[in-house]
Image (cartoon, helix red, strand yellow):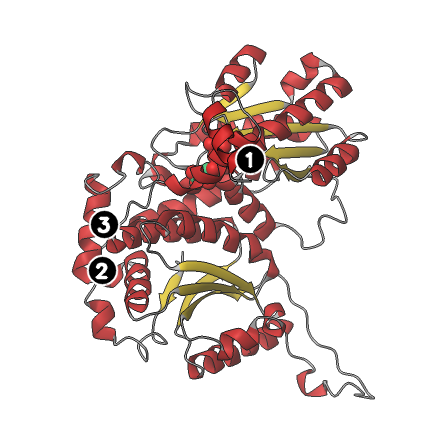
């Protein structure tokens, strides 16, 4: 079986190859710290050997729970935010029919998401839609106290109980949370929900290969065994010396570029299905690296769509960016461009070619243009867009993120900055316990 691979040749015109290779020993030291658990945040390195520790029995149990929801529900709502949402969303979107939201296939439940915003309109429209649907809920929160998720779950639970009764609702709700702590654990125990544990040593943004990602993905009808198998392959592929290790090489190249003044990394795809893989990646890198006044800003574009909006900036704006392109070698389907006798649109020069050939030439042409315009280019090649290679891709990015964070000298496994908005929101909402903060913040308004 092939593996995903990384190409760095279009970096070396900006940062000499020797400079990138110069990071080899630092990358190996960072990797060693991850494996020895001697670096910053070492309590949260459970993701490192997670793929190879997942047993077939565990996957069978998850699949059985997924099958029960699939049997009972035409819609399953996944409530979660951040790391408790983006992994599942990314994988499901990447594997789904692009128009799946228009045409339920009758085989798989529709997966909807909630608890990732506090929009009243969103929640109104979602609950209105669910009124006529047979639905279930997967509620995901490691802390068990996240306001966005808890609020959505309260609404959804109330509605489900009204629609099918408390007893049947219990059969259609699964909670994924900490083993012991948090309001969701207490609630789930009290209500008698089926639960899964998010391991203590796996942070939200590294949790896609725990039940947080695996259960929703299985409910959506995708093969979690293949997803995990891909990650297992990457786990050993990335547990190697620098010259063989794509994660270490990616970490080295992006840190060398950062040191050379490239402060923004744009993740690029040429398939709109990968949009949420970019959102997942942005959280992984943004939350892991953006601290202590440091960190590459992770951005993303969907091409060629955004060449007609952000393309101008990328080509000629401030030269502080570099690109990482996810290139899918072979699409799932074949569409050939037909010939046309009249040729009024002038497209006959493309007749007989596959659409993907045009896409690939757009990709190559863009790469050359951007490099000419001063944008270093990294390329990650995925042989196909399927469960196996998405599993590989996600583990590849996770491992690289751990190494990269250590190269940067920060703790890639905490997120202290996320608390700031919560404290203010609780103070403004006058949450019990926040009396002093409420008085202080009110004075500032
Ligand atoms: O990666 C993280 O740790 C965060 O994005 C969390 O996943 C997010 O804040 C949601 O937290 P919780 O799962 O505790 O509701």
Relative depth, front residue between 214 and 19? 19
Residue named by callout 2: 242
Q: Under 8 Å from ligand 1: the CB of mark 3?
A: no
Q: Under 8 Å from ligand 1: the CB of mark 2?
A: no
Between marks 3 and 2 in the image, the one whose residue lies nearer the viewer: 3
> Vertically, is 292 above or below 320?
above
Q: Residue at x 54, y 24 (%)?
A: 431
Residue density around tag 1, few if under 14, some if 14–19, many if 20 or more, within 10 Å: many
In the rendered view, does 288 fall on the left or right side of 214? left
Residue 384 place in picture, x, y as percent: 51, 59
> Vertically, is 65 above or below 424?
above
Between marks 3 and 1 in the image, the one whose residue lies nearer the viewer: 1
The disc, 3 or 2, on the residue closer to the chain's N-terminal end is 3
Compute the Cα span from label 1 to label 2: 36 Å
Compute the Cα span from label 3 to label 1: 31 Å
Q: How many marks?
A: 3
Residue 280 place in picture, x, y as percent: 49, 49
Residue 158 place in picture, x, y as percent: 70, 20
Q: Under 8 Å from ligand 1: the CB of mark 1?
A: yes
Relative depth, front residue between 384 and 368? 368
Residue 397 place in picture, x, y as percent: 39, 53
The residue tagged with tag 2: helix, strand or loop?
helix
The answer to whether mark 3 and mark 2 are in CB contact below 8 A is no
Q: Quadrant of the C terminus?
A: top right
In the rendered view, does 168 fall on the left or right side of 20? right
The quarter of the displayed image where residue 202 is located:
top left
* Residue 31 numbered tag: 3
Residue density around tag 3, few if under 14, some if 14–19, many if 20 or more, within 10 Å: many
The residue tagged with tag 3: helix, strand or loop?
helix
Residue named by callout 1: 80
Q: Inspect this view and state whether residue 415 appears.
A: no
């Amino acid at each position: 079986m092939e593996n995903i691979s990384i190409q760095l040749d279009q970096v070396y015109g900006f940062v000499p190859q020797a400079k990138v290779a110069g990071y080899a020993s630092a990358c190996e030291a960072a990797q060693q710290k991850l494996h020895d658990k001697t670096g910053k945040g070492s309590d949260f390195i459970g993701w490192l050997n997670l793929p190879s520790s997942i047993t077939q029995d565990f996957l069978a149990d998850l699949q059985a729970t997924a099958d029960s929801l699939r049997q009972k529900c035409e819609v399953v709502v996944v409530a979660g935010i951040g790391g408790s949402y983006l992994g599942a969303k990314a994988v499901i979107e990447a594997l789904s029919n692009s128009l799946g939201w228009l045409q339920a296939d009758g085989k798989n439940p529709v997966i909807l998401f909630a608890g990732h915003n506090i929009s009243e309109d969103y929640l109104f429209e979602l609950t209105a839609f669910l009124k006529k649907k047979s639905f279930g809920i997967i509620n995901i929160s490691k802390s068990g106290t996240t306001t966005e998720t808890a609020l959505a779950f309260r609404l959804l639970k109330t509605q489900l109980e009204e629609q099918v009764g408390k007893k049947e609702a219990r059969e259609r709700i699964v909670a994924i949370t900490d083993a012991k702590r948090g309001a969701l654990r207490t609630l789930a125990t009290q209500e008698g929900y089926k639960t899964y544990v998010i391991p203590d040593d796996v942070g939200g943004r590294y949790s896609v290969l725990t039940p947080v990602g695996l259960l929703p993905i299985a409910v959506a009808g995708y093969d979690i065994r293949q997803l995990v198998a891909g990650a297992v392959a990457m786990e050993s592929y990335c547990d190697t010396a620098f010259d063989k290790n794509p994660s270490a090489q990616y970490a080295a190249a992006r840190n060398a570029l950062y040191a050379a003044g490239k402060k923004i990394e744009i993740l690029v795809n040429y398939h709109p299905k990968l949009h949420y893989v970019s959102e997942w990646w942005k959280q992984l890198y943004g939350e892991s690296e953006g601290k202590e006044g440091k960190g590459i800003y992770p951005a993303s574009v969907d091409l060629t769509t955004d060449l007609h909006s952000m393309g101008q900036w990328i080509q000629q704006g401030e030269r502080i960016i570099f690109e990482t392109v996810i290139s899918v070698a072979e699409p799932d389907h074949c569409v050939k461009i037909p010939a046309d006798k009249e040729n009024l649109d002038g497209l006959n020069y493309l007749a007989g070619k596959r659409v993907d050939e045009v896409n690939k030439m757009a990709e190559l042409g863009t790469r050359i243009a951007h490099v000419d315009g001063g944008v270093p280019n990294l390329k990650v090649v995925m042989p196909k867009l399927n469960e196996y290679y998405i599993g590989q891709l996600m583990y590849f990015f996770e491992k690289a993120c751990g190494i990269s964070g250590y190269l940067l000298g920060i703790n890639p496994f905490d997120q202290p900055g996320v608390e700031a908005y919560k404290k203010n929101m609780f103070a403004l909402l006058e949450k019990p316990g926040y009396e002093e903060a409420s008085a202080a913040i009110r004075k500032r308004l």
